[in-house]
Image (cartoon, grey):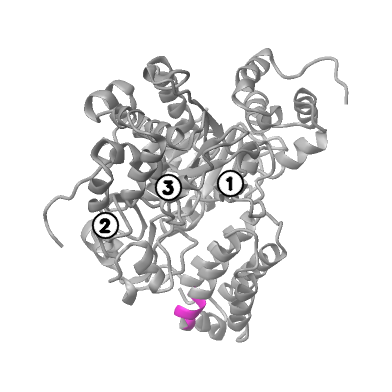
Amino acid sequence: MSSEKSTTLFIEHFQPECRFLHYYLKEMEGYQGLKKAFGMSPSEVIEEVKSSQLRGRGGAGFPTGMKWGFIPKQSSVPKYLVCNADESEPGTFKDRDLMRYTPHLLLEGMLIGAYAIGARSGYIYIRGEYAREAVLLQEAIEEAYAARYLGSNIQGSGFDFELTVHRGAGAYICGEETALLNSLEGKRGEPRVKPPFPAQAGAFGGPTIVNNVETLACVPFILRRGGPWFAQLGKLEKSGGTRLFCLSGHVKKPGLYELPAAGVTLRELIYTYGGGILNDRKLKAVIPGGSSAPVLTAEEIDVVLDVEPLMKIGSMLGSAGVVVVSEDYCVVKLIQRIAKFYAHESCGQCTPCREGCRWMEEVLERIEHGKGRTQDLNLLLQIADNIQGKTLCALGDAAAGPVASFVKKFQSDFEAHIRGGKCPN
Amino acid sequence: MKQDKKLLSQKFYDAMKKLEPRYPKKVALLLPALHEAQQERGWLPPEILDEIASYLEIHPAQVREVASFYTMYDLEPVGKYHFKFCTNIACALRGADALLEHCQKKWGIVCGETTSDQRFTLREEECLGACGTAPALMMNQQYYEGLDIAKLDALLESLE
């Protein structure tokens, strides 16, 4: 690893005083990207974002410019830009800092996105628990309205954009974009059948783009310094920019680390940046991309933390929420807690997910409490298999993948519970 | 259901009026209305749900099906101090269970219950998005992070 300090976009501004418009204008070239965008055609803006190799930071890693390109140029109904600020993936806590410390970066990113896709209204759908962050966003929005960065005829450009903060109310599933749109419309947060995709019919029936907070916060930099500049920050061809890695669990220095996209291995993140394992214990397991990501063992941490390298070894980068587990914590107990989470958060629409998640939780609970049977491990794999790929949204897969991975990779831990009739930890 | 006298305040109706032009459909105000009403009343009793239904011109059942979907809406009374302990993975790895256990013992209640003096409600919460500063809890609308038993005790003592 080189000792040279790499470029960062966000993290040096994660201080309370950075949230104000005057700071943003003075210290962060605030709204200069928007100014540049106004001098370009919407399709030129989309091309610029395409050239940046920016991919979604919410979990799926889809190229942002391509997503924007799916929006029809002409539409008889209003188009919308929606920011997904539902950040609920266990292990993820980056968007919260972006919103409370650099809200204008998000606003400018949304303005550029709205201009590119031709939306005149936007919403920031923020999880209900982030009550404080919702207030801070609202204050930034009011500053922006007062300075004519929001509203009608923004900075004399002729472009209008209205932005509203919409609070969720405690439902993990609302991070799924169509569930989010239902929730925005005043309904239960149940995912929709796709197609139609949001780009054709999303919020209130209009063509809609849903982007994650961090994704949108990257956009001003792309306009200011150009797509190719942003692209070269990343260390793999398809991954431009930097990433905010959320490091938590059994490490000495948990927290956010902003590093070049694809520019760090899991080992480096844990040992070089995170200071190693808490109390100098042995590493047992790592969840590399939020609780939906299949688990990795201590032998698998030389992988580069990015979409394709993790996919290649059967896991995923997801939201870049890295949760580190030492030998001090029982892995069966851990996956039982994860299964309990998905059983609680399953919206109940699809039978395989609704029934399967509960069942997996039940079986894992009895194993953890020493009441498991030898055939339970196969049973868990079967249930997982009966969920995977058989549901409307990704929540079912998000529950099944981790369960199957824990059972396969830590089989001896499960067997020890069953054989000994209790949790050995 | 017809109600002559309004239970929700003018402040509630003013807030809704201000939000109305932000959405193309009035029913989109349902989540904001439930938040605002709960803020005002402490919880969401049936007559408040009915009043929201009549304001939004939707069936009361539609309000209930939505309100009951989301965990933050309290359809039963809660204590003055509503403690929600995150026990999801990042917090669990950092000792959340011990904090929860501490409060259960101290207050003589289990998760989901309220103390008989209506002061404390205790709940287990899913990930709060404070994993880097785990373990964390949410009390009413406020986050408390980087907790241990001593910090938790200090917080409890600071409450009147």
What residue do we see at 31% from left, 49% from top?
A51
**Dot 2 corresponds to which residue?**
A274
Name which of mark 1 and mark 2 comes first in the sequence.
1
Q: Is residue A337 above or below residue A366?
A: above
* Whole-percent x, y for residue B12 in the image: 66, 19
C-alpha gap between disc 1 and disc 2: 38 Å
* Whole-percent x, y for residue A128 in the image: 55, 38
Q: Could you say which disc has been placed on residue B149 in the image? A: 3
- The residue closer to the viewer here, A266 or A119, is A119
* Whole-percent x, y for residue A58 in the image: 45, 51
Question: Relative to A102, is A395 on the left or the right?
Answer: right
Badge 1 and badge 2 both on one subunit: yes
Badge 1 and badge 3 both on one subunit: no
**Amino acid type of the residue tagged 3 in the rendering:** Ile
Figure quadrant of residue B20 = top right
Judging from the image, mark 3 belongs to the subunit labelled B
Element carrying mark 2: loop
Q: Is residue A288 above or below residue B131?
A: below
Q: What is the span of residues highlighted in magenta in the rendered image?
A: A406-411
- For discs 1 and 3, the disc positioned in front in the rendered view: 1
Question: Relative to A347, is A425 on the left or the right?
Answer: left
**Dot 1 corresponds to which residue?**
A198
